[in-house]
Amino acid sequence: MWWRGAGFRRWRRLVVTALVGLLGGAVVVAVDHSAARGAVIGAWTDLVPGSTAAVPAGSAGCRPGADSVVSAPDPSASDGHRAVWVHRPAGVDDATVPVLYLLHGYPGDPADVAAGDLPGLLDRQMCRTGRPFVVAAPDGRAGDTDTEWGDDAGGSFAIERFVTTTAVALVEGAERRAPALRAIGGFSMGGYGATVLALRHPDLYTQVAAFAGYYHADDPDGVFDDDAAHAPDRLVAPGSGQRYFLVEGADEDTALMRGSVRGEADRFAVLLRRAGVTVAVSHPAGGHSYGVWYSQSAAMVTFLTVGWAAGTARTR
């Protein structure tokens, strides 16, 4: 759980990182997704073993995707390179294939997304809907700082810039997606980050999936010099054309510096609806955990697929 209450001594799980063959510039390390979870996946080691359930058969396209890690030099990253874990579906990957960027929580790292059940769950949902998409999880860490997926006002790191520029270039390359085929999501702090980045960059992201997010500026480490510029509930504007899928467990009780995650999804949904923005809210049983959030993977993929279908029709 990601507790953020005032006076709480935050901890971080230590993750051994080893980027292979770093010679400067972008690095790509490919890994067969069909390998057992818990093996090395790209740059991250000591991943938690998870499900290796096969993607259900039924068509030639229903095959597991493949994992890789891409990275670029960044002095604020632990080893001088900031990386993105990428899960590409089977088949051709081009500009018509949507991309979902997923942001981890605090304390956390891309291994929280890359390890365990999520890649297999999403593969199965792609098979169900018949709409493949790329999943990309960037590294939002900067030492022990709670980055809030932002750029540090003091200049020590630029996570927002990495996600919205470098990561897009690393993941999409020459096959850059239209905004209608790009979504951003996240868990806990990542749910906040996904929402605020989408609102600050509506030219990049058309859909948002936020799990246990919070929708006001809650900045325990003083990253921002202007909270209003990073407060989702102050950035909502009509006419954006964006779509939001918000998940908050029925038993959510995670403390924030101000208030709690509890009730944030419904509060933010009211603001979105007043602005004429499409929003769906889900309250599954349980609290602040990946198991609760992953239970909504089918609903999330259905929601995103509807938006991507409309986006594809508009771009033709």
Image (cartoon, rainbow, N blue to C red):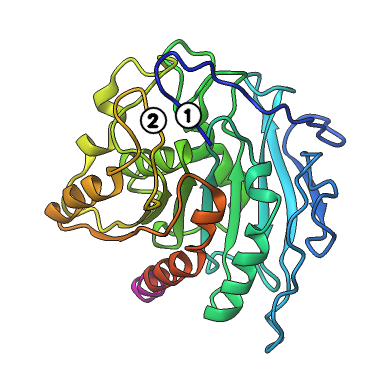
Mark 2 touches mark 1? (CB < 8 Å): yes
Which residue extends farthest left? 274
- Let me know if residue 173 appears in the view: no
| Amino acid under disc 2 | Ala
Q: Position of residue 293 (x, y in %)?
A: 49, 55
Looking at the rendered structure, which numbered label has been put on residue 255?
A: 2
Q: Position of residue 285 (x, y in %)?
A: 43, 58
In the image, what residue occupies the spot 52% across and 50% down?
101
- At x 64%, y 69%, the residue is 123
Q: Is residue 311 left or right of residue 56?
A: left
Q: Helix or strand or loop: what does disc 2 sit on?
A: loop
- 266 or 186, which is in the foreground? 266
Judge whether 185 appears above or below 166 on screen.
below
Q: Which of the labelled discs sits on residue 3, or is there none?
A: 1
Q: In the image, is 266 to the left or to the right of 74? A: left
Q: Could you say which quadrant of the image residue 247 lies in?
A: bottom left
The question of residue 311 being in magenta is answered with: yes
Give the Cα distance between marks 2 and 1: 6 Å
One can see residue 252 in this view: yes
Disc 1 residue type (three-letter) = Trp
Task: Report the span colored magenta.
Answer: 309-314
Q: Quadrant of the C terminus?
A: bottom left
